[in-house]
Image (cartoon, helix red, strand yellow):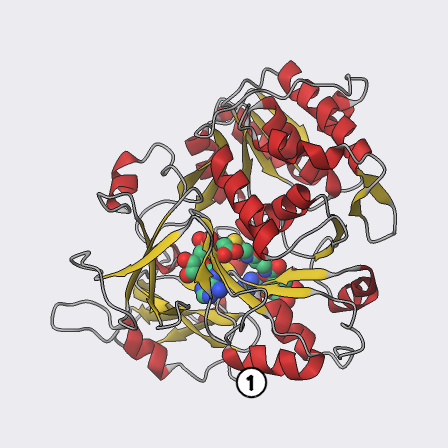
């Protein structure tokens, strides 16, 4: 049998009348209608010359049709390449140049700027997709046949390419196979007890692992349905929650909802499960949520490169501050970051992982791929953690220089390079500082030359348009020198301590 992820989820589509996605206005896309639409879009893609293995790069606003496009790519055997809608033109240019997609799909509003750039990079077709089911890709699908023979794929064929920024150098495209997607979705369905009775309140973006794979793929393998919000909005969350049984979110969802007087036992009483991930959920947030709603949030841990790695148990204790047990078929170990020697229970070291969930490498970067795997096939996550005597994994820090803001990864090196290029900047260090809303706030500490007339506004102004908004520092602070050790390395820990309370009241 073909290992195409779509073939794995195809049984859900046989229940043609069942709701797949409900829009905020209450209108419903059934599984039957979705199946036919994916067929039409797959036929349109094939007509545009998309062949198995070709990349289809997609930067569009969230909509049910964007999910249909993802599924159509699977059916056509293409490699789906979703891009954060916040990426600027400069960022997009790199992704498109690196991935060499056959087709780029963008929002109608961005066509005028993206099309000339994509054409220059040799892209064959630039199409649009709007949020109302409009756009040239949908026009091309109109009139196509509903039926499409899903292209056979092997387990190791690529289904998706997701770019993750790197601690050094440019972003890397994580190559995810059909087996990566299927194995994780099937496991999560079981461990989180998803069934066709479930309705997922979906407010996450769909260009990252969390909203696209964890949320959508798990829904699909279980034949569940989703209530689809364009973005997180507390009023909409409370209006639509009565329809749902499960919610998935980043910790910012939980801290924001906790600030809302409507959060109570009553307003969440019909809910079966709250899942958190992508960034650390503070133990205090876990406890507050439990006290306010009676629900223990189920925290899990994953990465773009690995899909989901661990999960707190459905039945057993969901330990605040821990990320739970390795998922079935996934092996997690703790190793000495330098030597790779395995460490005993409770010792803190590098979290390494192996299993059918782990990606097959970075797109056209064999050296980088090699550097992040041990010889025995374990992937080096860059997260520091331990496994306790009950088997729970705890993340205690990061071995990689990374800031996670509201669930989005921001790599300091990328921001520092942009700041250092500003006239009058001598050097800079970008750090994550505890932030009440985003978990960590991107913070720039800058050394300016004495004669430079630089202030916070000027630095932010220079970065605007060069970096996606979520990457922009929330504050820019000026210092005469950066603290360094004897080797000349900037002491970021010291900077983090100095600015620890910066966002305490935001
Ligand atoms: C928006 N802004 C952010 C931000 N999101 N800044 C820092 N960090 C973020 N995450 C900016 C906006 O551009 C805006 O800038 C200002 O902050 C205020 O915006 P907002 O209206 O408060 O933000 P909002 O639109 O509500 O978005 C916040 C959010 C969103 C938390 C709801 O960021 C979000 O949905 N995050 C989820 C990310 C996610 O899905 N991660 C999964 C990655 S996969 P201005 O200048 O215009 O005011 C992964 C693997 C795994 O990590 O394990 O899951
Ligand atoms: P990304 O590259 O966007 O997929 O982000 C992956 C990173 O998010 C991981 O390497 C972790 O550092 C972090 N992460 C994901 N889930 C959790 C969690 N539950 N707790 C702490 N960190 C997490």
Closest to the observer: 353 or 141? 353
Query: Residue at 45% of width from left, 85% of height from top?
Result: 501
Answer above or below: position of 354 versus 280.
above
Which corner quadrant of the figure contains ligand 1? Answer: bottom right
Q: Position of residue 339 (x, y in %)?
A: 15, 57
Q: Secondary structure beneath disc 1?
A: loop
In the image, 209 versus 407, the foreground residue is 209
In-front residue for pair 116/31? 31
Where in the figure is residue 81, as x and y percent of width and height? 53, 36
**Residue matched to label 1:** 505
Task: State which quarter of the image contains the N terminus.
Answer: top right
Judge left or right: residue 91 versus residue 351. right
Query: Is residue 108 at all visible to an observer of this figure?
Result: no
Residue 55 placement (x, y as % from top left): 52, 28
Outermost residue, right side: 26
**Residue 443 drawn above or below residue 411:** below
């Amino acid at each position: 049998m073909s290992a195409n992820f779509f073939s794995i989820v195809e049984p859900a589509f046989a229940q043609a009348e069942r709701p797949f996605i409900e829009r905020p206005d209450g209108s419903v896309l059934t599984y039957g209608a979705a199946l036919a639409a994916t067929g039409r879009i797959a036929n349109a893609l094939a007509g545009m010359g998309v062949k198995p293995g070709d990349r289809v790069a997609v930067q569009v606003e969230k909509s049910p049709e964007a999910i249909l496009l993802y599924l159509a790519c699977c059916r056509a055997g293409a490699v789906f390449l979703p891009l954060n809608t916040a990426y600027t033109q400069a960022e997009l240019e790199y992704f498109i140049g690196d991935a060499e997609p056959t087709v780029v799909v963008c929002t109608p509003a961005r066509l005028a700027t993206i099309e000339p750039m994509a054409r220059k990079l040799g892209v064959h077709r630039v199409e649009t997709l709007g949020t109302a089911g409009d756009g040239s890709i949908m026009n091309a699908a109109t009139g196509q046949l509903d039926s499409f023979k899903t292209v056979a794929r092997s387990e190791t064929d690529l289904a998706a390419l997701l770019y993750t920024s790197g601690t050094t150098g440019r972003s890397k495209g994580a190559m995810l196979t059909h087996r990566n997607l299927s194995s994780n979705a099937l496991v999560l369905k079981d461990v989180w007890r998803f069934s066709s009775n479930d309705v997922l309140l979906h407010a996450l973006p769909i260009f990252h692992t969390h909203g696209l794979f964890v949320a959508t793929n798990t829904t699909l393998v279980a034949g569940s349905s989703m209530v689809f919000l364009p973005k997180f909005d507390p009023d909409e969350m409370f209006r639509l929650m009565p329809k749902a049984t499960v919610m998935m979110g980043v910790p910012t969802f939980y801290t924001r909802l906790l600030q809302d007087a409507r959060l109570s036992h009553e307003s969440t009483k019909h809910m079966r499960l709250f899942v958190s991930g992508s960034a650390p959920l503070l133990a205090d947030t876990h406890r507050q949520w439990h006290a306010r709603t009676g629900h223990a949030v189920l925290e899990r841990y994953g990465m773009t490169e690995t899909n989901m790695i661990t999960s707190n148990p459905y039945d057993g204790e969901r330990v605040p501050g821990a990320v739970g047990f390795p998922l079935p078929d996934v092996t997690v170990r703790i190793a000495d970051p330098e030597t790779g020697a395995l460490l005993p229970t409770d010792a803190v070291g590098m979290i390494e992982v192996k299993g059918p969930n782990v990606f097959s490498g970075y797109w056209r970067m064999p050296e980088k791929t090699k550097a992040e795997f041990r010889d025995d096939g374990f992937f080096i996550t860059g997260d520091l953690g331990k496994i306790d005597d009950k088997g729970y994994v705890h993340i205690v820090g990061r071995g990689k220089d990374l800031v996670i803001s509201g669930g989005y990864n921001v790599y300091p090196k990328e921001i520092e390079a942009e700041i250092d290029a500003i006239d009058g900047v001598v050097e800079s260090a970008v750090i994550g500082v505890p932030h009440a809303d985003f978990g960590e706030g991107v913070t720039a500490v800058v050394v300016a030359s004495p004669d430079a007339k630089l202030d916070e506004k000027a630095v932010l102004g220079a970065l605007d348009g060069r970096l996606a908004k979520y990457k922009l520092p929330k504050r820019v602070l000026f210092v005469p020198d950066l603290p360094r050790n004897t080797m000349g390395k900037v002491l970021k820990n010291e900077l983090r301590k100095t600015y620890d309370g910066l966002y305490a009241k935001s």
